[in-house]
Amino acid sequence: MANVKINHRGIQEYLDGRHGVDALLESQIQETLGRARSAAPEESGDYKRSLHVETVHTDRMVKRVVADVPYAMKVEANYGVLTRALGGRGGLVKYTSKSGKVSMITQAQADNYSRNRR
């Protein structure tokens, strides 16, 4: 049996965004922000202008696209702007397995499962 020692400090460095992780997350979130802005309704333009990126640290680096107008939830409910902007990056899709079990999984998982079905 192999003896494995986990480098907790090294793992935490990645979770904190070091070693290129911050740049990778930033490029992905900017793409998502761009898709959200292009799909945002433009009745007054306030919603579109309110879209921005927030970076927070919990036990790891987190980047979010946020709309902070008071009616942002209503826009999301009616148009699904942020949901569609995810484009499968963290968004969930409904997947039915061979046995008929329905699960919510990422698009990448669904693509992988579908490849294995062939």
Image (cartoon, grey):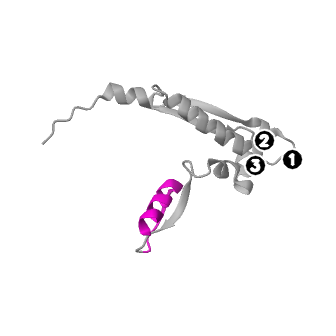
On residue 7, the disc is none
Q: Inspect the image, locate mark 3, and give the three-letter code of the amino acid beneath it.
A: Ala
| Residue at image mark 3 | 39
Q: Is the Cβ of the residue at disc 3 closer than 8 Å to that at disc 1?
A: no
Label 1 element class: loop
Q: Is the Cβ of the residue at disc 1 closer than 8 Å to that at disc 2?
A: yes
In the displayed structure, would residue 101 be above or below residue 39?
below
- How far apart marks 3 and 2 lie (CA) works out to 11 Å
Who comes first in sequence, dot 3 or dot 2? Answer: 3
Along the line of sight, the residue nearer the viewer: 11 or 114: 114
- How far apart marks 1 and 2 lie (CA) works out to 9 Å
On residue 47, the disc is 2
Residue plotted at (61% across, 37% down)? 29
Q: Does the stretch in magenta take in 8?
A: no
Along the line of sight, the residue nearer the viewer: 107 or 16: 107
Which residue is at the far left? 1
Q: Nearer the viewer, mark 3 or mark 2?
A: 3
Figure quadrant of the C terminus? bottom left
Q: Inspect the image, locate mark 1, and give the three-letter code of the amino acid beneath it.
A: Glu
Indicate the quadrant where residue 46 lies: top right
Q: Nearer the viewer, mark 3 or mark 1?
A: 3
Residue 16, image x, y percentages: 45, 27
On residue 43, the disc is 1
Q: Does the stretch in magenta take in 113?
A: yes
- How far apart marks 3 and 1 lie (CA) works out to 12 Å
Residue 3, image x, y percentages: 16, 36
**Does residue 81 appear to the left or right of 109 in the view shown?**
right
